[in-house]
Amino acid sequence: MMGNMELAEQLKAQLEKANKFKETITQISSKKSGVETEDQQEVVLVRTDQSGRVWPVNTPGKPLESKGGRRRRQMASTHEEKERVRYFHDDDNLNLNDLVKNEKMGTAENQNKLFMRMASKFMGKTDGDCYTLDDMFVSKAAEKGHFGEEENQREKAIAEHRSLVSQMERCLYCFDSSQFPKHLIVAIGIKVYLCLPNFRSLTEGHCLIVPLQHHRAATLLDEDIWEEIQMFRKSLVKMFEDKGLYCIFLETNMNMKKQYHMVYECIPLPKEVADMAPIYFKKAIMESDEEWSMNKKLIDLSSKDIRKSVPRGLPYFSVDFGLQGGFAHVIEDQHKFPRYFGKEIIGGMLDIEPRLWRKGIRESFEDQRKKALQFAQWWKPFDFTKSKKC
């Protein structure tokens, strides 16, 4: 800017030399570490509670210590001038919101462990009748110091994140997964897509409504995703009504810890068979699972949907008959309840061989391609994803 071109050329040369030196240093450091910088990424650690709510994990305030050495025990001062000023060592760092969050995130197992730990430390001297059992528990808990609580939460969050990543890598319904069969997609909405099953269909027109993101159950969905699923449901009912068929929608939510992808199945049936479907499903649900259950055996979904009928975090099975609602059942024992429960009932109504609804029969790529093209022709007049109207 000042017109001194010689100085400008010198500064440019120095800048290029510094950039080259920086590149060589980064290459050497990456070779030594054995990890490329492109593979590194930052992840926000979260924990999921039993109700399906996601909470961020607080990072430890102090740097993590190595596990090899022995930690020095720290005493928390609880009294000043013969008056109690705190009960626990971290009272100064926690407010009421943090205490409420910790209480909601905790489980009965954690409370039992805390009780056993404090009861085992009963070695203090009593002060006559003034020293009660509650005083002993509070004092010993304050002296204990609760070392490693934040580190344990962080390790659990890391393990949960790794489990979710590995599940999404081999998930059949996630777009980023290598196992995802893209040739079976029929329509893609904003947050939901319609596809065909990766095995031989139970009936002609058997299809799946699946969220784009990796969600586990309908009770954990956001409102906009649930509304788009209902738009797909209405269009499918209209499409199959023109062909004289009646739709049944199934969802089974089990094994929350394994974090399976939510799938909303649509199975069309002939009208004479579909008219008897509510009776079959009601009888099968009443006879399924445990004889004595903690929850209501049969939940009616005619007045409200599954998201308002079943609490978050509970495993359940739900069936809807067209647009008229249906039934839901909270699963008591997941080991006794089969994952193919709904398809087994439909298979019995249609007298289908068990291997079709139990594990599914694989199809060749050509058969799947023909099935997808035929369904796409049926769906084209009712496809609301093109005009964003239902």
Image (spheres, rainbow, N blue to C red):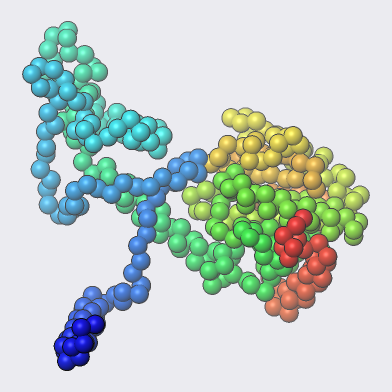
**In the picture, which quadrant includes the C terminus?**
bottom right
Residue 247 relative to residue 70: left or right: right
> Quick check: 348 above or below 88?
below
Please determine whether, in this image, residue 3 is positioned above or below residue 186: below
Q: Measuring 45% from the left and 62% from the top, which residue is drawn there?
A: 165
Q: Position of residue 177 (x, y in %)?
A: 53, 69
Residue 124 sits in quarter: top left
Of all residues, the one furthest to the left in this rendering is 81
Q: In which quadrant of the rendered view does residue 183 lie?
A: bottom right
Q: Position of residue 148 (x, y in %)?
A: 23, 44
Q: In this view of the protein, which residue sits in the foreground, 276 or 154? A: 154
Q: Quick one: which residue is furthest to the front in this view?
A: 2
Q: Nearer the viewer, residue 339 or 302?
A: 302
Q: How many marks?
A: 0
Residue at image x 79%, y 57%?
A: 236
98 is higher (above) or lower (below) than 223 = above
Visible residue check, residue 86: yes
Q: Residue furthest toward the top?
A: 129
Q: Residue at x 80, y 48 (%)?
A: 322
User: Which is nearer the eye, 180 or 118?
Assistant: 180
Where is residue 377 drawn, in percent x and y? 82, 70
Query: Percent from the top left, x then y, of residue 219?
Result: 59, 44
| Residue at the spot 23% in from the left edge and 31% down from the top edge | 91
Q: Is residue 338 visible?
A: no
Tell me: 380 left or right of 217: right
Question: In the figure, is residue 279 to the left or right of 138?
Answer: right
The quarter of the rendered structure image containing the N terminus is bottom left
Q: Is residue 282 above or below residue 341?
A: above
Task: Left or right? Give the position of 320 relative to 164.
Answer: right
